[in-house]
Image: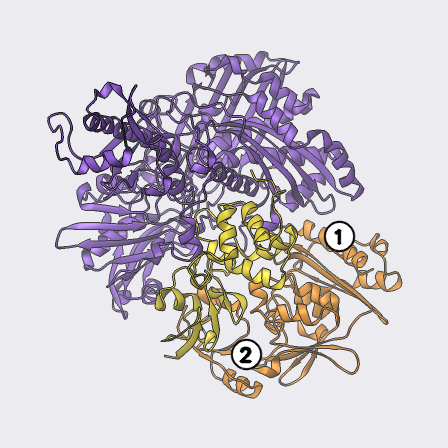
Amino acid sequence: MPKDHDGIGADTKRREDVRFLTGRGKYTDDIQIAGQVHACFVRSDVAHGEIVSIDSFAAEAMPGVLAVFTGADFAEVGGNPAGWLINSRDGEPMKEPKRPVLAHGKVRHVGDAYAAVIAETPEQAQNAAEAIEADIKELPAIVDMAEALKGGRFVHDEIETNQCFDWGWIEDNRAATDEAIKNAPHVTTLELVNNRLVPNAMEPRASTGIYDPGTDEYKLYTTSQNPHLTRLLICAFVMGIPENKLTVIAPDVGGGFGSKIYHYGEEALVLAASKRLGRPVRWTASRSEAFLTDAHGRDHVTKIELACEKDGTFIAFRTETMANVGAYLSNFSTATPTFLHGTLMAGNYTVPNVYVNVKAVFTNTAPVDAYRGAGRPEATYSLERVIDMAARELDMDPMELRRKNFIKPDQFPYASAAGLEYDTGNYDQLVDKMEEMSDAAGFAARRKESEAKGMLRGRGVNAYIEACGIAPSNLVGILGSRVGLYDAATVRVNATGTLSVMVGAHSHGQGHETAFPQVVADMLGIDASSIDIVHGDTSKIPFGMGSYGSRSLAVCGSAVVRATEKVIAKAKKIAAHMLEAAEGDISFEDGNFSVAGTDKSVSFGEVAFKAYVPHNFPLETVEPGLEETAFYDPANFTYPSGAYTCEVEVDPDTGKVRVDRFTAVDDFGNVINPMIVTGQVHGGLAQGIGQAIYEETTYDDNGQLTSASYMDYCMPRADDLPFYGVDHSCATPCTHNPLGVKGCGEAGAIGSPPTIVNAVIDALQSGGKDVKHIDMPLTPNRVWAAMNAN
Amino acid sequence: MPQISMTVNGKEVSGEVEGRTLLVDFLRGDLRLTGTHVGCDTSQCGACVIHVDGQSVKSCAMFAVEADGADVATIEGQANADGSLNVIQQAFQDHHGLQCGFCTPGMVMTAAALLKENPKPSEADVRQYLEGNICRCTGYHNIVKAIMAASGQDVSAIAAE
Amino acid sequence: MYEFEIKRPTTIADAVKALSEEDAQALAGGQTLIPTLKARLAMPSALVSLTDIPELKGVCQADDGAVCIGAGTTHAAVKAECASLYPALSELASHVGCPAVRNRGTIGGSVANNDPSACYPAAVLGSGATVITNTREIAADDFFDGMFATALDEGEIITELRFPVPEKANYQKFVQPASRFALVGVFVAKYADGVRVAVTGASEDGVYRWSEAEEALSSNFSADALGGLSVEPDDMIADLHGSKDYRAHLVKVMTGRAVKAAG
């Protein structure tokens, strides 16, 4: 469709913007319920301790206090489970210590909630929380992963180890990979840290629980990326509420980036408290609580080896990783360092041998889980750093080394050595475009200009691939997922021709309310403005697995296509009846049903009306109404890829890094709304640049989070970042979903960190500094220290 | 408890508050003007930026009683009289300067303050002026572009994609 | 926050009286104090707001040329009103916090708080300014007394800061990237009788004068004069943003840049 029709490919302005720009968005904390009371959580200020006693006598007597909960109140209910079962190399299942609603017996990280106070006002709740006297016997904190693996002291005493699992991928490739590396003419080895990040969605988590004793029904407003999964976890695992008695509503949500995928104990607490008190119970996290308790991201320590021929032909990649899972297993925490990481360790390359070993480690720190990219940034960073280092050792151009080993377009579908089947891609084309857009040829002149100012300029490159559209139930089932990963949509055509499309994906910044109607409008030949998206309310939508893993359009969008196809199929039956023709003779184009070879036609609107006013209707073959639901479960992941480059300037006197130019060329397959896709890339780039240069999460030896506010955790600001050059014209559509789309939400965060680090190393080496690697974030102090290490 | 009154978006309002009541809590809780957001507790994120007597302030770092008698403007009062988006709001929509929308009210209010001080800001001016406003979604590219466009500058040369 | 009442006196005398009550605390712009109260790190019985006292506001020039700034003058007003009177101070003010913070935060509040990473203390000490309170005048050299500590007595209010205007001056701030406070900030001011160099952000003892640099620059006001000097790292702050060595290094780099920029 042409762009002015707001169909597929149009830069349609976002309709949701109007409410956000006028202050009429409705986020969880904006929703006030009559009779509401407030929860305040009592959180551990030590990283590890035995709860000897909790005395809430004084607190309960304080003004406005309605109830105090402790871990004992939830001792008999279930725990918050890990969603993926990972088996160790020896076949043993991973260790799964219970994650209770409130800590019971022990506290295991600073911020671990062991009690909650409900009071009439937030201040009263906080006053009473301070009055709770807990005798917590502090135990030595287990913070460092290598130390944790030595054992002796345990985060969870009942499992008698701090190792959650020791996973090999692909275990059968281990011996061959070891052998290949042993015999290789050249091996580059790099030890690196993928730094822990705090997701920092700008809206802090918030939940309001409402129990209706008249119907025995619960309602939960919460900041969630996937309300159905939250409902499932609360009902089936944590509280045992019948699933038809709980409605979960995720209204406007102010960003997620992974941190709001998961179910958290606060959600269960407000529901339980609401039932006990018969009042709506609300809680909104402070930013300080968010730092301490939102699931963090990354935190890998990795040794990677790249074996290759003297001419640079790759022979093998082998990695050993320690992945921090924190104090408890968050819902996706075991999938992130394994199947979202190890399976990508062949990158874009025709390398024959890959072996990945990951040990997941419990520590007395906040739980770690999927954060924008989730495992794939870690894989990309390891690969693209070691390749860059190898190029320098082999004295080859870094991009030429990559090109030499790229999977070529005629090799697709390509079975990677890490166990995935990539459907499409054209990596050389992406690099060509990147070099053109970024004016690679002009770099030498720009470097001279920088040098004249006393600055060191470097250029970094990167090629990445990711597995997105997190789904195929069949595949993730083999990989250990305990849930199916598909999505669902209902397309409801109203009698007057407007549509409501209920989708299982959840939009918290991605613009689904605008982009999904573009798809339906295109298929039905109608105006997108007559189509509304309904999302985020389990009582209104059929089912859904939410938004994460760049999956919304590829999986849920495909469900929308399937449901719309069903609508068209049924509408054809009705049209055939109306036109007194055989169904097989009806064609549908531009919103009209017509009979082949005649001028007889009816519009989509007329058919919709007929469906609901079924006078003279062939009831024996067609039911009234026009509403269809589809569940879509794809055949494979999707495989977005890209080529990135950036130029940085490093101040040799201070070590300060400034990103001067950044170019991201991505292959997302087909694109529905280029404006939105570009915006997604921008945001991902900022988070990736943040990881590379600014964001550092640090715990001290006692397990205290020392980067616990914006005073110490550096969120990238506008003046830290450049304008970005972004392109997605080099598309190789996905072959196995009906839209040919691949997903774009995480790419920027995956491709950018190694690009930045590669550029800084290039800059330092150009200035004669013998620096081969610096761990992220490349803060001024770290860069300066690396330059002056000798 | 102190009685306060002020003008908010052109309307006289009054209320009874505690000394410790922050201006943002008065706006959100008492006046139900929930467009002004709270994203941190250290007065750094800027989601709560409003205008008091024509100047941008962080409403989480000012007590409600300190605004007694003041002229307060919030995001809810920014649209044109006919309800259409004002120039800055429209530029944010046109240039996709928002995603989740949470930081957006503070961004729009800060942008308005900037353009009042500096009607034709350079890219560097805009970026520096936004140092007290954090956005986690957009990477700032389209926010900077939108603000420059709202100032009447031609932004077509800035990479559209 | 804990409960407290807020008093809004309109004269210095009334403010002083209100502050004499037990656990009363002054509230200037509140840009540091309010986040502290939110974290329940302070428990005043009353806050005495200084923002409604007209005599605490404004910038003027004394007969001897000194720039006199009312303690309740906001950073934004310092930036605007000192632009021609004392450009280096105006420039410093324009990088304190962010625009919204500059519209509330005041110079007096910042100086009284003496955060070891704040910018104003460097200007006050580097200019050899006089801190004027409701009871006395205190020379800058006698005012700052280590991190968050000053010569102010209980209930004493800064009313004005008097800056002798140097021939040349410049402030260089290397920002701590998260907080945007100074990781290291150096204020250099050249007067007829010598050069003053004040360093903020770096030392465990708060703002201090780098006397070796002052001596070297007094005889030769050029970045080259610093060549032979080194900064002792022992007393420097070490945190996740900068080691002692790094801060010591930055003191020298920023001093050199300030001298160059001062011209």
Nearer to us in this view, A570 or C36? A570
Label 1: how many residues lie within 10 Å, few (<14), some (14-19) or many (20+)? some
Which of the 4 image quadrants contains residue A478? top left
Q: What kind of residue is marked 1?
A: Val
* Quadrant of the frame with the N terminus of chain B: bottom left
Q: Which mark is residue C50?
A: 2
Q: Which structural element holds mark 2?
A: loop
Q: What kind of residue is marked 2?
A: Leu
Q: In the image, is residue A771 above or below residue A260?
A: above
Q: Which mark is residue C253?
A: 1
Q: Which color has been applied to chain C in this rendered view?
A: orange
The answer to whether C96 appears left or right of C163 in the picture is: left
Task: For residue A161, say whether it is visible.
Answer: no
Q: Which structural element holds mark 1?
A: helix
In this view, which residue lies farthest toward the front? Answer: A599
The answer to whether A372 appears left or right of C67 in the picture is: left
Label 2: how many residues lie within 10 Å, few (<14), some (14-19) or many (20+)? many
Q: Which color has been applied to chain B in this rendered view?
A: yellow
Where residue C4 sits: x, y (%)?
Answer: 42, 76
Nearer to us in this view, A366 or A418? A418
The chain identifier of the residue carrying mark 2 reads C
